[in-house]
Amino acid sequence: MKVLLATKKPFVSKAVSEIQHIIETAGHQFDKIEKYTEKSQLLDAIKDADAVIVRSDIIDREVIDAAPQLKLIVRAGAGYDNVDLNAATERDICVMNTPGQNANAVAELVFGMLIYVLRNYFDGSTGTELKGKRLGLYAFGNVAKMVAKIARGFDMPVYAYSPIMTEDDLRKEGEYGVIPANSAEELFENSDIVSLHMPLLEDTRRCVNYHLLSRMPDNGILVNSARKEVINEDDLMRIMEERPNFRYITDIQPDKHDEFAAKFPKRYFATPKKTGAQTLEANINAGLAAAKQIVAFFKNGDETFRVNPK
Ligand code: 3PG
């Protein structure tokens, strides 16, 4: 089988060579296309691939159509909103992710960004601390769990709300010590800092809106390490205009990045490029998991971590 690694934002070379080793040791052929700039390059590279490993690379219907032999798409990471699941399912292509493999990296960045902003971009002026600030986690998957763990070290009370978990489910996750909120509204009301951890789905698109944001206390901070589309940008803009102390910190630049940056230079921070999963460890964890999942799929039909219906 031919396995293509297609990464616009490449993995560190140590991860790439280990992926190649796993694939070739299992008797498959390995090829890669990294840092490509044109979609046509991907369309060309994927044309004889049986499986592909991607990151946030867009795998839409056109890309799938260009790959007549494709049987498996592995998103080396958590969010698979970049893959057209309908197009894949119609072609009987299995789509998988590698859940949890880069969660710690993303969680650490949440605190890195928070400290950077709370210490006023290290400009030497007096900032504030995390200790004692109430942290609200909106959704409670792998990244949120790591954030909850780290927050305990900062002595922060941590609240959590998940639309797909009951308060009892959240309480059962005792090792993370979160206080369940019974609604998204309650979470926003009780949190000085709200951190977003939901996947991008039709249900979560623009779910963070004026109705919720307006419930946050004075000096509220919203942190986004999920996807830009989960926020209603116009509502966020409105809140930042109305509330002179509200801050927004994100690892994914919104569509209106330039406007946010110009209007709220001290209250808006966005990483120049999505950085959450950009660590040596996360690259190796996610990349190797993807390679092993591909080998197991072709060896014995293992579809653990399949995300699309059969
Ligand atoms: C994910 O969904 O796994 C993260 O957003 C990381 O995405 P990336 O691999 O494109 O950095």
Image: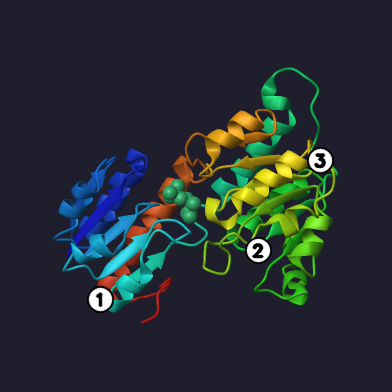
Residue at figure coordinates x 23%, y 46% from the top left = 33
CA–CA distance in space, label 3 to label 2: 24 Å
**Can you see residue 145?**
yes
- The secondary element bearing badge 2 is classed as loop
Q: Which residue is mark 1?
A: 91
**Can you see residue 270?**
no
Along the line of sight, the residue nearer the viewer: 153 or 60: 60
CA–CA distance in space, label 3 to label 1: 50 Å
- The secondary element bearing badge 3 is classed as loop
Q: Which residue is mark 3?
A: 219
Q: Which mark is nearer the camera, 3 or 1?
A: 3
Whether residue 281 is situated above or below residue 306 in the rendered picture:
above
Q: Amino acid at mark 1?
A: Arg
Q: Which mark is nearer the camera, 2 or 1?
A: 1
Query: Looking at this rendering, what residue extends furthest in the top direction?
Result: 124
Q: Which residue is mark 2?
A: 140
Q: Position of residue 281 (x, y in %)?
A: 47, 45
Q: Position of residue 74 (x, y in %)?
A: 35, 62
CA–CA distance in space, label 2 to label 1: 32 Å
Q: Position of residue 193 (x, y in %)?
A: 75, 47
